[in-house]
Image: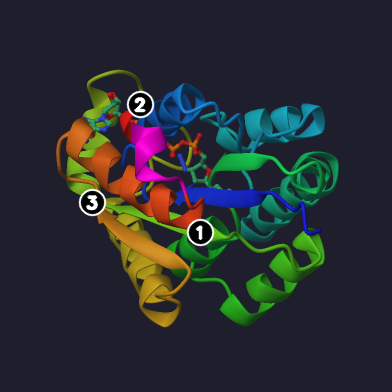
Amino acid sequence: MNTRGKLIVFEGVEGSGKTSQIKLCSSWLQSLNISVVVTREPGGTDLGLQLRRLLLEAGNSIADKTELLLYAADRSQHVHHNLMPNLAKGAIILCDRYTDSTIAYQGWGRQMNIATIEQLNLLATDGLQSDLTILLDIDPEISLKRILQKRKLDRIEQADLAFHHRIRQGYLSLAKKSPEKIVVVNGNQNIEQVASEIQQLLISLLKISLTEVKS
Ligand code: Z5A
């Protein structure tokens, strides 16, 4: 019997609502007695937390290639010490960012070679792909305003707006190429509307019966 769990990834520009939706989705699944593992990149392991601090601290000067390799190092550790062992136990994993973030940010944003990034993603993941990627699509001008209402921008968020627009285009291009795997959800709706669309996607992916949802 195949007991492999499911890897569900949330992607989008900063402030698109990934963290909020992962929280809502996790509570909803738990209310249906489906236990979940919530994790993120960078920072889904002890080592990853240290890499996350280095990567995001405002003021750190990091060469583009160094940045790419640090994200790959974080991912390799995450895949081998968190994702693979949990999937082998049958876990439903909700993961904030994965390989498409590197294509969008380092590939489209920093304009590094996408074929090289794909090879690096393969090396880091040993080919582990998401079962479903939910792309919360939103204009970065709106999403960065959301963040600024709560806190200061981090090192990557401080980049110019053209950088963030390229990232959004990168994500949309990935979704166009793999519509069976990456589903675009309009992130510029209210939180409840976004959550409801995500629930419909998960009902279908996890084959949750409607009686479970109603009871
Ligand atoms: N990065 C990379 O370059 N390459 C890689 O390979 C990987 C990552 C893996 C990680 O940051 C950074 O690393 C990220 C990409 C880069 N760039 N930066 N900076 P992160 O993942 O920890 O953080 P983030 O995704 O960039 O931002 P965030 O603050 O966590 O945003 P979010 O999770 O998408 O949104 P949120 O926290 O749920 O919501 C933001 C605010 O908006 C908050 O006040 C909410 O209450 C509000 N919100 C949420 N939804 C709504 C709706 N629907 N309406 C109105 N307001 C809303």
Secondary structure of residue under mark 3? loop
Measure the C-alpha gap from mark 2 to mark 1. 26 Å
- Ligand 1: which quarter? top left
Secondary structure of residue under mark 2? loop
Three-letter amino acid code at the position of disc 1: Leu
Three-letter amino acid code at the position of disc 2: Ser
Give residue 211's position: percent from left, percent from top: 36, 38
Sequence order check, earlier mark of 2 and 1: 1
Image position of 81 with respect to 20: above or below: below
Q: What is the crowding at mark 1: few (fewer than 14 residues within 10 Å), some, or many (at least 20)? A: some
Quarter of the image for residue 190 reads: top left
Residues under numbered marks 3 and 2 in contact, where contact means CB atoms less than 8 Å apart = no
Give residue 40's position: percent from left, percent from top: 60, 37
Left or right: 30 as drawn, with respect to 172: right
Which secondary structure dominates the residues rendered in magenta?
A: helix
Residue at the spot 75% in from the left edge and 70% down from the top edge: 122
Image position of 99 with respect to 24: above or below: below
Residue pointed to by mark 2: 215
Secondary structure of residue under mark 1? strand
Left or right: 180 as drawn, with respect to 39: left
Three-letter amino acid code at the position of disc 3: Ile
14 vs 129, nearest the viewer: 129
Give residue 55's position: percent from left, percent from top: 62, 38
Tell me if residue 208 can be seen: yes
The residue segment tinted magenta is: 208-213
Residue pointed to by mark 1: 132
Location of the N terminus by quadrant is bottom right
